[in-house]
Image (spheres, rainbow, N blue to C red):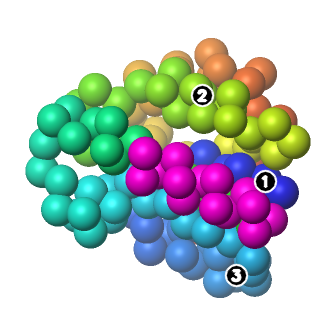
Amino acid sequence: MNFYVVFTKNKNKFDKYVKVNKIKNKVIIDIKSLLVEYEIDDYYEYKDYFNLIVYTKIIHSLEKKKDIYYIPNFLNKNFDIDEIVKVKGLLKETDFNLLLFFDEFKDTDNIHQSVLNNMDLFDASQILKSY
């Protein structure tokens, strides 16, 4: 089983990646979509509740032996990769991987620096120039 942190702002590119690579037996946890689905406007007000929802999805996916593709909410002004890395502690026998769509972040220095500074935390990394 694998856990992928997917750096993409455009979910359509990721959907194309999944289709082209014929990826099956997966669970996609898209934070932005979950916030909309559960009608959470203020993440910080419902932080514990929302984190429990995400945690439950991760645990159920691991129990079903499915790969997890985690797409953070990059619209969040307080985005911090260290928050995502905390998830690694939950993943005991699961590889912690990175999938980065480079073209979407080529002008975002803080994302590049945080990813490059934490590259050693990932078991495998894949950087896609364009998709």
Q: Start and end of the magenta stretch?
A: 52-65
Tell me where residue 120 appears, x and y as whole percent: 77, 22
Q: Residue tagged by mark 2?
A: 85
Residue type at mark 2: give it: Val
Q: Is residue 119 left or right of residue 87?
A: right
- Taking the magenta stretch, the answer to whether it contains residue 58 is yes
Verify CB contact (< 8 Å) between mark 1 and mark 3.
no
In the rendered image, the vertical position of residue 59 relative to residue 79, given as above or below: below
Q: From this viewpoint, which residue is outermost toward the left?
A: 41
Between the C-alphas of marks 2 and 3, the distance is 28 Å
Tell me which label, 2 or 1, sits earlier in the chain: 1
Q: Measuring from the top left, give residue 110's x and y in whole percent.
A: 41, 22
Crowd band around label 1 with a 10 angstrom C-alpha radius: few (<14), some (14–19), many (20+): some
Label 3, secondary structure: give it.
helix
Relative to 123, 18 lies left or right: left
Q: Which mark is residue 20?
A: 3
Disc 2 + disc 3, Cβ < 8 Å? no
User: In this orientation, which residue lies closer to the viewer: 26 or 91?
Assistant: 91
Vertical arrangement, residue 72 with respect to residue 14, above or below: above
- Residue behind mark 1: 2
Question: Which of label 2 and label 3 is nearer to you?
Answer: 2
User: Residue at (47%, 51%) from the top-left corner?
Assistant: 54
The local secondary structure at tag 2 comes to: helix
Residue type indicated by callout 3:
Val
Q: Is residue 20 left or right of residue 82?
A: right
Q: Earlier in the sequence, mark 2 or mark 3?
A: 3
